[in-house]
């Protein structure tokens, strides 16, 4: 149980949600940390189910990918933590937390992300799901899951930074005092939760206007990578490799790689976009018309001359008199010389 003060609000937090009795006076503790991660995972699945059709992904095949990628991601998250935390294992039981009061504890989100995408790629190939479509859909779901799951760090009073120097801004508990001394510390879990929530809405909006497959995945790399790199610099419990913070280094590389590939992808889309031309017939120049064929200026002049000749012929036909009228107008008047005009009387 923790007594926590965050932004002037005093809370009593119990990490254990409930205990399942197993008999013999023993029980299995269920932690809020695990419940919150499960809720985040469930929300990500719901988002995927509701939006699979928009990405033209078969729902049954998508769930097949998720069912395999999920346990692999959890195992990779645990393995990643052990590799960089320096935790000493005495047996396989320690890896899974058997016999430990804290259970299956010590997970690193980057290990989970790497495991999810790697196993997801293989399953997409096996189940004939478009990999980039699946990654785009999963990237948005990841952010909503991460946003909720980060509150598990708050319940455990971990993932916090150094002193803020303020009497109001930040949080304080026994864990923070033991780590950095008395005073308010940066609630890094909250910063990342809000950053992921904002990213979820941003990527969801962009997904409705994506210009190429894989674009949303790259936006995830840029958004999460940048935010995590900044927030990680504040934390006091980072996993380290020599003098470097592992997560901060990975985040920076992820952000730069995503930005580079996004720019290249957008340029390729722009280069493939058809160019529209106005139909203009300039002498000596070739003009591309809307149907994609090429018409020379000489051909244009020939067509124009044919049209003018046709119009002149039509006008001439309209102005020409009819044959009876022409005969009447041109016939001469004949009178016999010396003949007197007939007055109409009989001789």
Image (cartoon, rainbow, N blue to C red):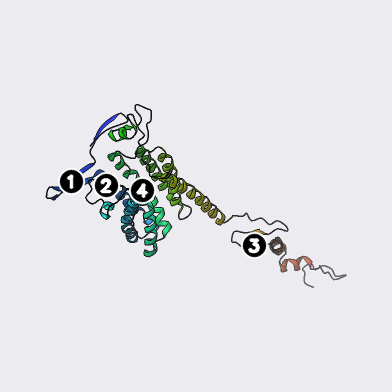
At a point 55% along the width and 52% down the height, the residue shown is 267
| Horizontal relation, residue 274 to residue 215: left or right | right
Please state, as top left, top right, bottom left or bottom right, where the C terminus lies in the image: bottom right
Q: Position of residue 151 (x, y in %)?
A: 31, 41
Gap in angstroms between the C-alphas marked 1 and 3: 78 Å
Label whose residue precedes the other's in the sequence (1 or 2):
1
Q: Viewer-nearest of labels 3 and 2?
A: 2
Q: Position of residue 250 (x, y in %)?
A: 43, 47
Mark 4 lies on residue: 109
Mark 3 lies on residue: 294
Gap in angstroms between the C-alphas marked 4 and 3: 57 Å
Q: Are marks 1 and 2 in contact (CB under 8 Å)?
A: no
Mark 2 lies on residue: 34
Q: Viewer-nearest of labels 4 and 3?
A: 4
The residue carrying pointer 2 sits among few (fewer than 14), some (14 to 19) or many (20 or more) residues within 10 Å by Cα, namely some
Gap in angstroms between the C-alphas marked 1 and 4: 26 Å
Q: Is residue 156 above or below residue 210?
A: above
Q: Quadrant of residue 157?
A: top left
Q: Viewer-nearest of labels 1 and 3?
A: 1
Label whose residue precedes the other's in the sequence (2 or 4):
2
Mark 1 lies on residue: 19
């Amino acid at each position: 149980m923790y007594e926590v003060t965050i932004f002037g609000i005093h809370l009593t937090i119990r990490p254990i949600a409930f205990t399942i009795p197993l008999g013999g006076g023993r029980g299995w503790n269920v932690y809020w940390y695990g419940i919150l991660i499960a809720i985040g995972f469930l929300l990500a699945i719901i988002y995927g189910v509701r939006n699979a059709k928009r990405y033209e992904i078969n729902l049954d095949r998508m769930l097949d990918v998720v069912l395999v990628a999920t346990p692999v991601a959890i195992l990779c998250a645990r393995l990643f933590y052990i590799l960089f935390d320096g935790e000493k294992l005495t047996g396989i039981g320690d890896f899974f937390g058997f016999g430990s009061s804290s259970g299956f504890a010590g997970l690193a989100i980057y290990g989970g992300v790497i495991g999810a995408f790697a196993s997801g790629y293989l399953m997409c190939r096996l189940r004939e799901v478009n990999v980039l479509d699946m990654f785009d859909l999963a990237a948005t779901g990841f952010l909503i899951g991460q946003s909720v799951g980060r509150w598990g760090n708050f319940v455990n009073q971990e993932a916090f930074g150094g002193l803020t120097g303020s009497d109001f801004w930040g949080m304080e508990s026994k864990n923070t005092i033991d780590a950095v001394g008395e005073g308010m510390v940066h609630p890094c879990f909250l910063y990342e939760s809000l950053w992921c929530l904002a990213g979820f809405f941003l990527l969801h909006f962009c997904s409705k206007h994506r210009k190429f497959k894989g674009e949303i995945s790259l936006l995830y790399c840029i958004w999460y990578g940048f935010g995590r790199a900044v927030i990680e610099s504040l934390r006091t419990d980072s996993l380290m490799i020599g003098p470097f913070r592992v997560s901060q280094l990975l985040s920076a590389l992820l952000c730069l790689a995503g930005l580079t590939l996004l720019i290249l992808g957008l340029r390729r889309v722009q280069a493939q976009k058809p160019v529209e031309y106005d139909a203009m017939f300039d002498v000596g120049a070739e003009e591309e018309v809307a149907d994609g064929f090429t018409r020379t200026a000489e051909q244009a002049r020939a067509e124009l001359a044919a049209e003018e000749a046709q119009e002149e012929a039509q006008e001439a036909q309209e102005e020409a008199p009819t044959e009876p009228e022409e005969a009447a107008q041109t016939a001469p008047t004949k009178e016999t010389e010396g003949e007197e005009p007939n007055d109409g009387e009989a001789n």
